[in-house]
Image (cartoon, rainbow, N blue to C red):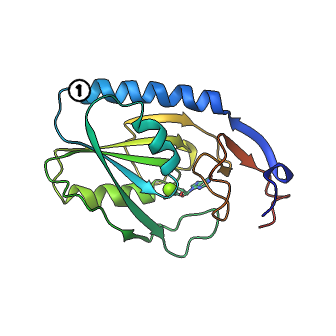
């Protein structure tokens, strides 16, 4: 794999800014869920992992965590199709739990709206969304984002959990790819 500097257009959100926002979100979530029983963080694999791991350490109310994986059928690299399928399901019974979905990015909103619909049928006590990034101008499905890290422009980003062909998730910042220069 290529060094990311070869196709880096710009660093959109640097490490310090990300970590500061994660602290704020953790505080906000802790405040809102204090005194409530059964908070369950649900990480959407794989993009949500990095954010989830940082965020949960900033949440100081008791909680559990679980993961689920979704695949967008027939998706090209830069689009999701809306044909969403669960490839790994939760191991936790979410009935009567206060569920908070932790997602890397909401783009068209199709993925998350499918997840919401599906989890709602399992009768959680509450169901909310925490998304690190919001590509608001691309929204097609109406999804309520309860906790939002940053609104970003319609550009393809990578790093901090987000991938380019499954690579670069480890980078501690969110960067914009220069598609002219990127060759997988
Ligand atoms: P949506 O269904 O269109 O909202 O797409 C959401 C999913 O597409 C996210 O969970 C990401 O996995 C992926 N995605 C959307 N935009 C980007 C991006 O700029 N970089 C990396 N992945 C992205
Ligand atoms: Mg994702």
Q: Is residue 179 left or right of residue 90?
A: right
Q: Is residue 11 left or right of residue 98?
A: right
Q: Residue at x 54, y 76 (%)?
A: 74
Q: Quadrant of the C terminus?
A: bottom right
Q: Quadrant of the N terminus?
A: bottom right
Q: Residue at x 47, y 26 (%)?
A: 23
> Between 20 and 113, which is closer to the camera in this rendering?
20
- 106 over 39 or under it: above or below: below
- Total residue callouts: 1
- 11 over 69 or under it: above or below: above
Q: Residues within 10 Å of mark 1 (few under 14, many from 20)?
A: few
Residue 148 image offset from top left, x and y in percent: 46, 35
Query: Which residue is identified by label 1?
Result: 34
> Between 136 and 9, which is closer to the camera in this rendering?
9
Residue 49 image offset from top left, x and y in percent: 48, 50
Residue 14 image offset from top left, x and y in percent: 68, 33
Task: Write down the quadrant of residue 2 in the picture.
Answer: bottom right
Q: Residue at x 43, y 29 (%)?
A: 25
What secondary structure is marked by label 1? loop
Q: Residue at x 44, y 36 (%)?
A: 55
Q: Is residue 150 left or right of residue 7?
A: left
Label 1 residue near ligand 2, CB within 8 Å: no
Residue 62 image offset from top left, x and y in percent: 25, 34
């Amino acid at each position: 794999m290529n060094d990311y500097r070869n196709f880096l257009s710009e660093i959109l959100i640097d490490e310090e800014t990300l970590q500061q926002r994660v602290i704020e979100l953790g505080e906000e979530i802790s405040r809102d869920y204090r005194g409530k029983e059964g908070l369950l963080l649900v990480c959407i694999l794989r993009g949500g992992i990095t954010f989830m791991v940082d965020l949960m350490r900033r949440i100081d109310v008791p909680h559990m965590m679980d993961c689920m994986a979704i695949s967008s059928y027939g998706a090209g690299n830069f689009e999701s199709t809306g044909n969403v399928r669960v490839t790994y399901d939760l191991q936790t019974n979410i009935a009567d739990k206060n569920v908070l979905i932790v997602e890397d990015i909401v783009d068209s909103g199709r993925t998350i709206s499918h997840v919401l619909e599906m989890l709602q049928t399992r009768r959680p006590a509450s169901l909310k969304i925490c998304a690190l990034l919001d590509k608001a101008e691309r929204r097609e499905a109406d999804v309520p984002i309860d906790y939002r890290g940053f609104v970003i422009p319609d550009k393809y980003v990578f790093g901090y959990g987000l991938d380019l062909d499954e690579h670069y998730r480890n980078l501690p910042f969110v960067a914009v790819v220069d598609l002219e220069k990127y060759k997988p």
